[in-house]
Image (cartoon, helix red, strand yellow):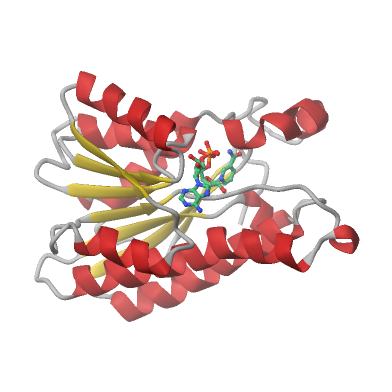
Amino acid sequence: MAREFEGRVVLITGGAGDIARAAARRFAEGGARLVLADTDATGLEAACADLKARGAGAEGRALDVTDVGAVEAAVAGLGGGLDVLVNCAGIYHHRLVVEMSEQEWDQTLDVNLKGVFSACRAAGRAMAARERGGTIVNLASVSAQRGSALHAHYCASKAGLIGFGRALALELAPRVRVNAVAPGIIESRMIEEMLRVRGEEWRRQIPLARFGRPEDVAEAICFLASDRAAYINGAVLNVNGGMWMD
Ligand SMILES: NC(=O)c1ccc[n+]([C@@H]2O[C@H](COP(=O)([O-])OP(=O)(O)OC[C@H]3O[C@@H](n4cnc5c(N)ncnc54)[C@H](O)[C@@H]3O)[C@@H](O)[C@H]2O)c1
């Protein structure tokens, strides 16, 4: 494939995570310069070392997406040079609604939804202010579409993110495209624990008969961020092996 991201700057929140790292490698193959932002400093170091070993430009930035000021500063630090924002930062905690504390609800909504709002607001302002615009890809989830017991806060955050993204796609057009990927069950650190408990039950619900890999999601993220998707705006692309169709 051509170096379709040559000269482009890509910021990925949750950049030390498994899906983010697979996407970063794929963007790097396309010639992008990566800025990975995460609360996990050790993971960031490893992710950046891996990218640099592949000859890519990469820098890690310690960032908590719930810190609105820090998110603004991170985007401002790119000096108007941001081309692609990918919002991968997320948490996935388990609790029945009837046992859930207000603090647990707020924490998930703060990271998964408000964090996306802050990053999109900062990036959207910067991208919309310049001729060549930019593009944003958010990480939704099949959980937003079909529900998931023990994860009502997570489902609500991801469903919120879909509605938020559609509104933003209208507001930032025509210079900035906003899309989402909705992964199904992807083998990553995030769901290791649930895979042990519900793995077999889940696998039976996937027509393609396997869990997804971070690379499967990375491919969809990079497609939506690329010029190949130049006429795609406000979309939610399912990457779930067929376990949910809409
Ligand atoms: N793995 C799946 O099955 C699956 C399915 C659907 C959607 N997703 C979504 O994809 C995205 C990536 O998930 P993943 O599977 O790679 O998980 P992951 O746990 O490997 O990555 C998530 C990353 O987000 C970071 N993070 C958490 N809170 C943060 C904060 N406040 N500020 C900055 N960074 C923070 C974590 O440190 C971690 O590196 C998430 O948004 C997740 O909800 C994953």
- The quarter in which the N terminus is drawn is top left
Residue farthest bottom in this picture: 171
173 and 78: which is toward the camera: 78
* Residue drawn at the location 25% of the way across and 74% of the way down: 125
The reply to whether residue 133 is in sight is: yes
Left or right of residue 112: residue 151: right
Left/right of residue 125 with respect to residue 42 in the rendered view = left
What residue is drawn where x is 76% and y is 68%? 102
Task: Find residue 57 and report its horizontal and vertical position in percent.
Answer: 16, 34
Give percent across and percent down for residue 227.
21, 51
Residue at point 14%, 64% (across, down): 80
Q: Closest to the observer: 73 or 135?
A: 73
Q: Nearer the viewer, residue 207 or 21?
A: 21
**Relative vertical location of residue 104 with respect to residue 166 in this rendering, above or below:** above
Check the image and report above or below for 2 versus 99: above
Task: Say which residue appears at 72% left-offset and 60% top-offset.
Answer: 104
In the picture, the quarter occupied by the C terminus is bottom right
Residue 140 placement: quadrant: bottom right
- Count of numbered tags: 0
